[in-house]
Amino acid sequence: MKKFFGIFLTAVMLVAVLSACGGKNDGNSGGQASGSPAAGGDSGAKKKFAIIYKNTGNPYGEKEMEGYKNAIEELGYEAILKAPDQPTAEAQITMIDELISQKVNALAIVGNDPDALQPALEKAMNAGIKVLSLDSAVNAESRMLHINQADPERIGRTLVQGIVEMIGGSGEIAILSATSQATNQNLWIDWMKKELEDPKYADVKLVKVAYGDDLRDKSVSETEALLKSYPNLKGIISPTTVGVAAAGKVLTDKGLKGKVQLTGLGLPSEMAEYIQSGICQWMYLWNPLDVGYLSGYAADALVNGTITGAVGDKFTAGKLGEKEIIADGDGTQVMLGDPFKFDASNIAEWKDVY
Amino acid sequence: MEQRLIANKKELTLKGFFLQWEWLLVLLLIGVFVMNSNLSEYFLDSANLRDATMGFLDKAFIVLPMVFIILLGDIDISVASIVALSSVIMADLYNHGVPMELAVIICLAIGTICGWVNGLLIVKYKELSAVIVTLATMIIYRGIAYILLEDQASGKFPSWFKFLGWGYVGGIPFILIAFVFFAVVFWILLHKTTFGRMVYAMGNNATAARFSGIQVDKIKIIVFTLAGLMSAITALFLTSRMGSTRPNIAMGYELEVIAMVVLGGVSTAGGKGRMIGAILAVFLIGFLRYGLGLVNVSAQMLLIIMGVLLIVSVAIPQLKQRFAYARRK
């Protein structure tokens, strides 16, 4: 009896293990289908283009990945979209490793850290993978090309000019950024500080740069902390879509319309209610779909050898037309265009677009 | 209190041998390999499997001493903060002109001290449980790391430092060799020394262990100090893989480590479980994650799968016990 029971239990465990495998198998093919709809049985022949965003649950990032996927599918290849659950470099390194194993042709990354990804991305490039960054750059040694959404100098200076106009030329302002290592935000903040050095802003004081890590709850609590620590705060600049929406919510809940001004870079769909209510008079952004789309075509041009990532190279980016590569510090980049201003007059038509 | 007997040597029957938790883990591991190689053509590739270990072994170093801590019936949730603090101090010292070799030694020393402080506090203030003490030090250690570097990153290490996380010795990743070395050391410590036996005794009944002349306080401090030291080892490998460090590295590592230990069959009530189980669990979770990553399962889905795996692993021994109890009646 005892022996029989032992054998029985072992058999049950074995069946449980096997059925678990079967079950997971089904679940995964579902997950895979949503990540890469183009994947069929012929995974061997098709060129594969991967993109890694900073973290999941960021509507801006989802649009950017969607744009990338659109471009890759227009070209008839397979797109792999990945994003870790936390905005950390560790998690991105793991994903880069997984993509190297999958022998993708190109890898586009929105970096969580400019330097920490270098060993992993160098390994990818040594394995013959074309590496480019978009939106948030990785350092020049870790990439072949960067896709820049807009001139960082213009973004930084425009945002400062905007908030100063809103607060009437004097008072305390604060910045609510993403993570402290986000390359793009840091660059914009540097330009904001440079703009503030101008003597005409003598009465404007930048009291703090807070980091909401592009997480909604942390951005909310950082905004609340700013309002508490600086009771005379008159304006907040949030150069990140998650942050500006969180700040808009806090200012609305606390009834601070007109007392604390808000501008930044926001998604029209998320910001429409705050722009219409006057919490945020206007804000800026480019089209994240286009950033992703341009990256997709740039990745393809790198893979088929049209460009090498050198200054002066030119390629055609689908509906966006011809783009030229220009210098960017030690590296090279392609620029999408100028930031676009959203206010009460045009938000209605854009909020359904992205 | 339930009476428990620690047999000097377990009766070895064939059935008993194969019904052990560790065999289920082996089966699960085989299951993961079968599943993954069906899911992705890239999984069963020696170079890929080899490189995959480099991705998940960094936190595995903490699993080894965590087995001791959980065997004692305690828990240490400050390990990830120790990783961050020792890594940040190392990077900061190096960037202030301290030679890298010395900075590495200081990193190990910092980790050891942090662990020792944990142990000391737990032993000195018996009314505070290990959860509370390490919850406090978790916040303190990471807080210090934030004070040192604020929100910035620090890096630009010499090129040899990259070897730890990315190098190979004779085609085998250095981190894998290091892990096997430490795993063997900790396995011997737990299963082949009187120290290990004392840990089991304390985990089963600390009071009885004290009255049997075991220096329970001393052992507890040693175990927590070891956890600090191994956290610093993890800090070295993780920092090397990243090439730079920030105060928020290794976030959530403590939970992953504890999950691996629990999945490895170590009872959170203390006194039950073996080193080999935890080591198997490291590879089980590591390869499962890697395989699912290869087919680009979304991050949220991955978290759900890990959670289910953990609940099932805790539930099975309970069910088994209930089963056995019902049969005895």
Image (cartoon, rainbow, N blue to C red):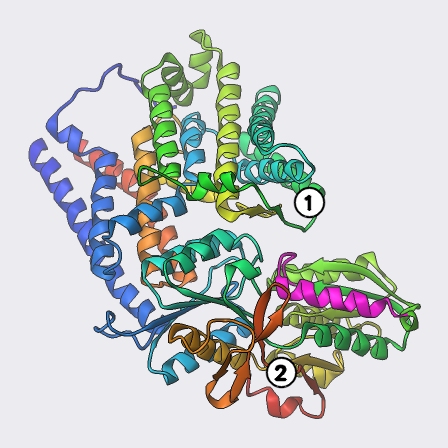
The answer for how far apart the CA atoms under marks 2 and 1 are is: 35 Å
Asked whether residue A332 is drawn in magenta, I would say no
Using the image, determine if residue A150 lies above or below residue A92.
below
Tag 2, which chain?
A
Tag 1, which chain?
B
Q: What is the count of numbered marks?
A: 2
Classify residue A154 as left or right of residue A128.
Answer: right
Magenta: main secondary structure equals helix
Comparing B270 with B155, the one in front is B155
- State the image coordinates of residue A174 (x, y, percent, origin top left): 79, 64
Three-letter amino acid code at disc 1?
Leu
Residue where numbered disc 2 is placed = A337
Comparing A99 with B57, the one in front is A99
Using the image, determine if residue B90 lies above or below residue A277.
above
Three-letter amino acid code at disc 2?
Gly
Comparing A193 with A119, the one in front is A119
Classify residue A287 as left or right of residue A317.
Answer: right
Using the image, determine if residue B51 lies above or below residue B101.
below
- State the image coordinates of residue A43 (x, y, percent, origin top left): 25, 71
The reply to whether residue A66 is in sight is no
- Residue under the point 84% across and 68% down: A196
Secondary structure of the residue carrying tag 1 is helix
Q: Label 1: few (<14), some or many (≥20) within 10 Å?
A: some
Point out the stretch of residues depicted in magenta. Answer: A178-198
Query: Which label belongs to residue B149?
Result: 1
Locate the N terminus of chain A and report the quarter of the image it occupies.
top left
Asked whether residue A190 is drawn in magenta, I would say yes
Residue A107 occupies which quadrant of the picture? bottom left
